[in-house]
């Protein structure tokens, strides 16, 4: 067990001023670490240090230094990939092979942004009046990065790599229950030549530590990933100080299954989209829409295959689903299941915890016979719980898919490429997968329409979100 894992402020592991908390392995219930959180005064200290590093060191201006440090972090992370993946699985309960993917994608993200800033040239143009225009991109300043517990390392790196690449300094807050891989990354960044004060990590509760970050006048930008309710609160609070804000929020993503694809293939995609990371994924395909001509046959096959998924030890390579992240989260999911049944939805399979495995192993759960206005269709459950509905036509499918306040992602399964493109363009979502699901691409933007967020991560947009463009006009 790791004793007293500490916050990182100004390149030093400091003693948190708040109470000590235990972190639990959700698969076994064992205490895996003890953490001492910071208080609001220490958040202030971290912001002061980050502001000083931004203004008084060459981090913001020395692009070769940043490229070098980011590449070193990527190399060291790659070398320590096994350790990081095992730690992530211990802390979150996600199957080890999923943690391995997260680490590999994190390495790629650091490399991508190092390459991007190395290649970025200012835009220049001769103007009609003989003057020359130059557009340069400068860092925003001190960035507060706040992430949830479902992909503690990867979602952190999606913010951290571009924020640092752009020349900002950072105060980072992991989720309360899953700080371990980010703390390890903090140590690795210091060993990679990160100047003191550029990357600080504060630990603790959203209501105390997160709140102090979003209210601090010297934090120039907040980049947040988490629930839409928290996101709305952060947006409103940041408006007071006119902070820059980007928000990656919740989803209720539809996956449209047309009748021209082999149903075994469609079922594979649906199971992967719905139950990857126990369904605790913002883009999880939680609403399956199936053409009515294959609906009966499809739900029977889906039921059988869902019941064959293996729940168990996340370190076992044969495991499909591990435990949920925490007892509090399981209770929220159980409430959705109970409410759906009370509202008249039919449970096709699942709905129960498997106590022989441990208190947090919930069966893959599928509801049918749902109405469009039920909470189980409209609200994000964030667990292994999905609904399946029939549709009559392409237009009907698109209307059902878009009938949600969210717009994070969607999927389409069809062999008709013209239809695939037509439907993809009609779906109001930031990512649409055709005949597959879940693959992010570091070069492509990631984010949501509607209540799923504001701004984009990844790709060039992920970098410019951490920059201020400046026009310099030079007269001869
Ligand atoms: P959450 O909103 O409860 O917490 C997210 C983070 O915000 C945590 O670090 C928390 O401590 C912090 N926080 C809470 N209250 C705060 C406050 N008042 N001020 C500042 N920070 C505060 O979300 P969660 O339950 O941890 O995560 C699940 C949610 O995240 C889901 O809705 C999911 O869809 C969303 N999510 C979105 C994406 C995406 O890319 N769009 C990715 C992953 C998760």
Image (tube, rainbow, N blue to C red):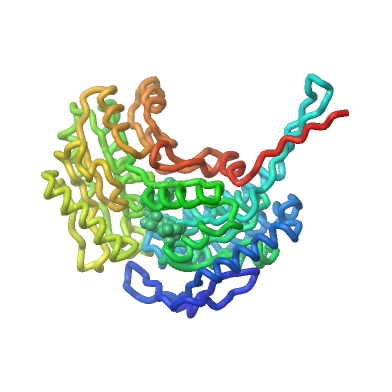
Relative horizontal placement of residue 96, taking residue 255 as reference (left or right): right
Q: How many marks?
A: 0
**Ligand 1 falls in quadrant:** bottom left
Q: Nearer the viewer, residue 283 or 376?
A: 376
Say which quarter of the image contains residue 216.
bottom right
Q: Residue at x 47, y 43 (%)?
A: 440
Q: Residue at x 45, y 66 (%)?
A: 208
Q: Position of residue 381 (x, y in %)?
A: 28, 50
Say which quarter of the image contains residue 346.
top left
Task: Indicate the quadrant containing the C terminus: top left, top right, bottom left or bottom right.
Answer: top right
Task: Indicate the quadrant containing the N terminus: top left, top right, bottom left or bottom right.
Answer: bottom left
List the single residue furthest toward the front. 240
Give the answer, above or below, for where 92 lies relative to 267: below
Res 52 seen here: yes
Q: Position of residue 101 (x, y in %)?
A: 47, 53
Say which quarter of the image contains residue 355.
bottom left
Relative horizontal placement of residue 249, taking residue 285 as reference (left or right): right
Q: Position of residue 389 (x, y in %)?
A: 20, 35
Q: Residue at x 13, y 49 (%)?
A: 341
Give the answer, above or below, for where 412 lies relative to 5: above
Res 99 seen here: no
Give the answer, above or below, for where 190 lies relative to 112: below
Q: Position of residue 377 (x, y in %)?
A: 24, 41
Q: Residue at x 80, y 24 (%)?
A: 126
List the single residue furthest toward the right. 476
Q: Nearer the viewer, residue 14 or 238?
A: 238
């Amino acid at each position: 067990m790791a004793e007293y894992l500490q916050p990182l402020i100004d390149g030093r592991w400091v003693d948190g001023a708040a109470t000590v908390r235990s972190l639990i392995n959700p698969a076994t219930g064992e205490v895996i670490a003890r953490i001492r959180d910071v208080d609001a005064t220490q958040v202030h200290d971290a912001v002061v240090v980050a502001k000083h590093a931004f203004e008084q060191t060459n981090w913001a201006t020395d692009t070769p230094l940043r490229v070098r440090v980011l590449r070193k972090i990527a190399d060291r992370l790659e070398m320590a990939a096994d350790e990081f993946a095992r730690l992530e699985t211990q802390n979150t309960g996600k199957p080890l092979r999923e943690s391995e993917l997260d680490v590999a994608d994190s390495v790629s993200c650091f490399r991508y942004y190092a390459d991007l800033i190395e290649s970025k040239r200012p835009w220049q143009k001769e103007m009609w009046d003989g003057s020359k225009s130059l557009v340069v991109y400068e860092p925003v300043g001190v960035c507060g990065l706040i992430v949830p517990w479902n992909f503690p390392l990867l979602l952190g790196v999606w913010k951290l790599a571009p924020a640092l690449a752009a020349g900002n300094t950072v105060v980072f807050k992991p989720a309360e229950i899953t700080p371990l891989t980010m703390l390890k990354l903090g140590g690795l960044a210091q060993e990679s030549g990160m100047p003191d004060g550029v990357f600080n990590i504060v630990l603790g509760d959203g209501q105390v530590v997160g709140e102090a970050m979003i209210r601090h006048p010297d934090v120039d930008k907040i980049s947040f990933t988490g629930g839409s309710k928290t996101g709305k609160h952060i947006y409103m609070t940041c408006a007071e100080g006119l902070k820059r804000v980007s928000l990656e929020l919740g989803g209720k993503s539809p996956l449209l299954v047309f009748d021209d694809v082999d149903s075994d293939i469609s079922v594979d995609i649906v199971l992967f989209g719905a139950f990857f990371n126990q369904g605790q994924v913002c883009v999880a395909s939680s609403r399956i829409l199936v053409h009515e001509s294959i609906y009966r046959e499809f739900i029977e096959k889906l039921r059988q295959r869902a019941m064959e998924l293996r729940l168990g030890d996340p370190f076992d390579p044969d495991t499909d689903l591990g435990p949920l992240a925490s007892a509090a989260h399981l209770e929220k999911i159980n409430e959705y299941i109970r409410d759906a049944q009370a509202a008249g939805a039919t449970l096709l399979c699942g709905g129960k915890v498997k106590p022989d495995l441990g208190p947090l192993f919930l069966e893959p759960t599928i509801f049918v016979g749902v109405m469009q206005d039920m909470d189980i269709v409209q609200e994000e459950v964030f667990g292994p719980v999905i609904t399946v509905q029939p549709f009559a036509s392409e237009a009907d499918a698109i209307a059902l898919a878009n009938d949600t306040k969210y717009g994070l992602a969607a999927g389409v399964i069809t062999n008709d490429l013209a239809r695939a493109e037509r439907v993809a363009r009609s779906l109001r979502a930031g990512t649409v997968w055709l005949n597959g699901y879940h693959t992010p691409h570091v070069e492509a933007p990631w984010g949501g329409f509607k209540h799923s967020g504001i701004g984009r991560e990844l790709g060039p947009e992920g970098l410019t979100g951490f920059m201020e463009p400046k026009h310099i006009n030079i007269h001869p």
